[in-house]
Image (spheres, rainbow, N blue to C red):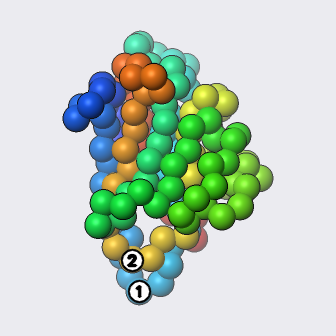
Amino acid sequence: NISTRSLVQTGENVMIGGFIVQGTATKRVIIRAIGPELTQHGITGALANPTLELHNAAGALVGSNDNWQTTILGEIITSNQVSAIQSSGHAPTAASESAIIADLQPGNYTAIVSGVNNTLGVALVEVYDLN
């Protein structure tokens, strides 16, 4: 599991969190981009509407999400994820936060967090092992 908090800006100054899936077997993970939830922990200037992209080691986009209760199909996301996110124990508390559940092959991955419509603010990117 990893977690990083940072100021999300625009362009080359978005938040980037890298992680490695080790071993020889596929690993089921949930990746979250959290903003509004941070205010309940005393964080000011939270990113109001984070969006999340997942890239593989080659830099290719393999999944994305904006508003976790709306699944964006494509690449590794082939079916509605809302129920799986809810039952994972890691569902975001605000509808505007983002999350992806993915079955990832061993390798390097990058989660990119940005603000919808180039908004700025403090956000958290997290990856949890669901196996």
Image quadrant where residue 16 sits: top left
> Of the residues shown, which amino acid type is indicated by label 1?
Thr
Q: Which residue ends up furthest to the bottom in the rendered image? A: 24
Tell me the kind of residue under disc 2: Pro
Disc 1, SS: loop
Name the residue at 40% across, 38% down: 113
Task: Report the residue at 52% width, 25% height from top.
Answer: 49
Of residues 14 and 73, the one nearer the viewer is 73
Extreme residue in the top direction = 44
Please state the horizontal and vertical placement of residue 72, each as a whole percent of the image. 62, 49
- x%, y% of residue 90? 62, 47
Work out whether 4 lies above or below 55: above
| Label 1 CA crowd tier, 10 Å (few <14, some 14–19, many 20+) | few
Q: Which mark is residue 24?
A: 1
Please report the residue visible at 38 percent of the width from the left and 70 percent of the height from the top.
21
Out of 56 and 33, give the one closest to the viewer.
Answer: 56
| Contact between labelled residues 2 and 1, with CB atoms less than 8 Å apart | yes
State the image coordinates of residue 1 (x, y, percent, origin top left).
43, 57
The single residue placed furthest to the left in the displayed view is 12
First along the sequence among labels 1 and 2 = 1
Which quadrant of the figure contains the C terminus? Answer: bottom right
Circle 2 residues within 10 Å: few <14, some 14–19, many ≥20: some
Kindly report the distance in space between the C-alpha atoms of the residues bearing marks 1 and 2.
6 Å
Q: Can the viewer see residue 41 in this picture?
A: no
Q: Is residue 75 left or right of residue 87?
A: left
Q: Is residue 65 left or right of residue 8?
A: right
Q: Is residue 117 visible?
A: yes
Of helix, strand and loop, which one carries label 2?
loop
Does 17 sit left or right of 29 as displayed?
left
Horizontal and vertical percent position of residue 53: 44, 47
Which residue is identified by label 2? Answer: 106
Q: Is residue 83 above or below residue 48?
A: below
